[in-house]
Image (spheres, rainbow, N blue to C red):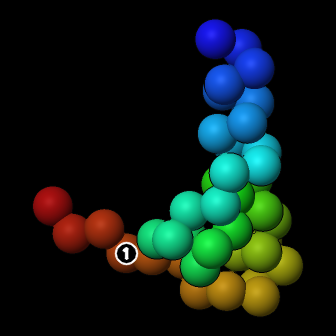
Amino acid sequence: MTNYLLFYNFRRIHGSLYDLSPVEFRQAVEQQQVKPFVVKG
C-alpha cells in the first residue's frame, strides 16, 4: 500500500492538476506558477 500511495502522490500525473502530480501541483502553487483551484460546495 505504501508504494501505491507514494506513486499516486509523487509520480502519477493528474489531468485535473494541469498534468502534474499532487506534490508538483502544490509546489507550483506555492511558487505562483499556477493558480489554485476554488472548490465550490
Give residue 22's position: percent from left, percent from top. Answer: 65, 54
Q: Residue furthest top?
A: 1
Give residue 35's position: percent from left, percent from top. Answer: 59, 86
Task: Say whether residue 19 is left or right of residue 6.
Answer: left
Taking depth in this image into account, of 28 and 8 the one nearest to the observer is 8
Q: Secondary structure at mark 1?
A: loop
Q: Quadrant of residue 37?
A: bottom left
In this rendering, the answer to whether 16 lies above or below 24 is: below
Quadrant where the C terminus lies? Answer: bottom left
Q: Residue at x 67, y 86 (%)?
A: 34
Q: Quadrant of residue 29?
A: bottom right
Q: Residue furthest left?
A: 41
In this rendering, the answer to whether 16 lies above or below 18 is: above
Task: Say whether residue 18 is left or right of residue 7.
Answer: left
Residue 1 visible from this viewpoint:
yes
Q: What residue did someone put label 1 on?
A: 38
Q: Residue at x 46, y 71 (%)?
A: 16
Amino acid type, label 1: Val
Taking depth in this image into account, of 38 and 20 the one nearest to the observer is 20
Q: Residue at x 72, y 14 (%)?
A: 2
Residue 26 visible from this viewpoint:
no
Q: Quadrant of residue 25?
A: bottom right
In this rendering, the answer to whether 2 lies above or below 39 is: above
Mark 1 Cα-neighbour bin, 10 Å: few <14, some 14–19, many ≥20: few
Give residue 15's position: percent from left, percent from top. Answer: 51, 71
User: Exactly how many numbered labels are in the figure?
Assistant: 1
